[in-house]
Amino acid sequence: MTCLPAHTDKRLGLVIDLDTCVGCQACVTACKEWNTGGHMAPLTDIDPYGGNVDGVWFNRVHSYEHTTEMGGRTVNFPRSCLHCETPACVTVCPTGASYKRASDGIVLIDEDKCIGCKLCSWACPYGAREFDTDVGVMKKCTLCVDRIYNDNLAEEDRVPACVAACPTSARHFGDLGDPTSAVSQLVAERGGVDLMPEMGYHPTNKYLPPRAHTTRAASVPAPALEPVRTEGGFLGWVDRMLSN
Amino acid sequence: MHPAFSVVFFTTATGAGYGLLALLGVLAGVGAIPPDFWLGFIGLGLALGLIAAGLLSSTGHLGRPERAWRAFSQWRSSWLSREGVASVVTFVPAGLFGIGWVLLGRTDGWVAIAGLLAAVGAVVTVCTTSMIYASLKPIAQWHSRYTLPGYLIFSAMTGSVLLNALLQGFAVGSNILLAVCLTLLGWGWKLATWRHNDRLEIPTTANTATGLAGGTVRSLEWPHTEENYLLKEMGFRIARKHAAKLRRITQLLAFALPVLLLAIVLALPWQAAAVLSVLAAAAQFAGMLVERWLFFAEAKHTVTLYYGR
């Protein structure tokens, strides 16, 4: 049923740190690698080695130049499903293929019910859903639902593939409905924000803005080097001759 | 938004079909038009044919059309599902109305009631179609108070111009005044809608989309080198280049030419009047296809902000 659950026991989601993301695309490839064999498999690629490359990806990293009166900087920006609390992509679905889980708040698609009308992708302001033209159904991030509860994986690996792959720990996974969880505390500490809050979809995923610019110059702990003492004797004579 | 031809044709054809069905149902129901066999046969055939062709065409853009029956299940939350249910339910009174008029040759009593119910169903279905678009918050040009009345007006307008062509064709009267008034109303509404859209101040910006407060956010690099699904479906840009020209074509074909032709019809004998009435309906249908195409092509989705478009 595409009506939304009144309450979800958990609100699993991601916290993405725009301060430390270096735009290396490791999360993008790790996501593709896991999910092309995972719950929503395959993530079809069309003409992968040709001139009109196209394909389904759940996670895309943009780069922006953010310019304020404090100066400009490059911000790398990973974009994926935000697993909203009130996702319009679910309520517009005419078939019941899209749903939000009452247990953990993850937004999923039942591929066997999807008719490929694409209306959910129109309803998502974030561009989180991508249509698989080969299979004829819509696809989206599953928050690696087949990893996070997977008993066959070591406990430390039971996180989304993008989180596991991030070399700078810019991606964090946890329960954002629990104010005592590590991710909730990180959001509170760093002033995490919602994307497009004016849309009113209450995204679960939060973004940590880059830390403020500093006006302090870099500190130099060692004293500057002194000029070399003038040598006497033979080496001093050679030095004086060569310096002329 | 990418204007898929199947959807452009769908909204134009079903709009005209439901408008014609509603007018036939109401006017025959109250006895304003005679229960003429050929008028009923061709008129209802055309209305239901346009509706059926539109609905079939709309399945053309589905990835899995064989599962389309599933779309009747989620009427509690989805306007698309409600549209599916309303369109199918409307066929019941419309079918009874057709049987009464065409096979039994009467439009009074229960046939009149069926006609009025078909008209109600037609109005409800057009409302549900418009709400599919009006409910989409990421597309500001659609999420507007102009969308629902626009669909109703254009449906009544195209339906009335078609009905006039039929009445003139079978020489059983005319409804030129209604057709001209509705066409002028449609023209005014379209101009007001364009004016509104051209002055839109959308609160969603690249700043709120990325969570980067203050200053400017400029797209430096896309995540991919070629156009992906999002850009093909939601980042359509061809029409914006020709928008001014296409708007003039729409005004000429959908509004100005039909009004002019219908005004000339008043002064002409029957055969010539019938030919011009049919021409007016054809020109308007073509004009509305362009209008619907622009409705999609000029609509801007918030995902384009991520791409600096």
Image (cartoon, coloured by chain):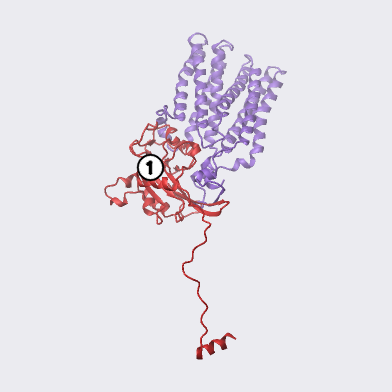
Chain colours: A red, B purple
Q: Residue furthest right?
A: B267
Q: Name the quadrant containing residue B69.
A: top left
Q: Name the quadrant containing residue A133.
A: top left
Query: Label 1 belongs to which residue?
Result: A176
Q: Quadrant of the N terminus of chain B?
A: top right
Q: Is residue B84 visible?
A: yes
Q: In screen coordinates, is A152 left or right of B177?
A: left
Q: Quadrant of the C terminus of chain B?
A: top right
Q: What amino acid is found at the position of numbered circle 1 in the picture?
A: Leu
**In the rendering, at what x and y percent does residue B102 appear?**
51, 14
Question: What's the chain of the residue with tag 1?
Answer: A
Could you tell me which residue is drawn at 56 percent across and 19 percent down? B43
Label 1, secondary structure: give it. Answer: loop
Relative to A238, residue A20 above or below? above
The front one of B242 and A211 is A211
**In the rendering, at what x and y percent does residue A94 appear?**
43, 31
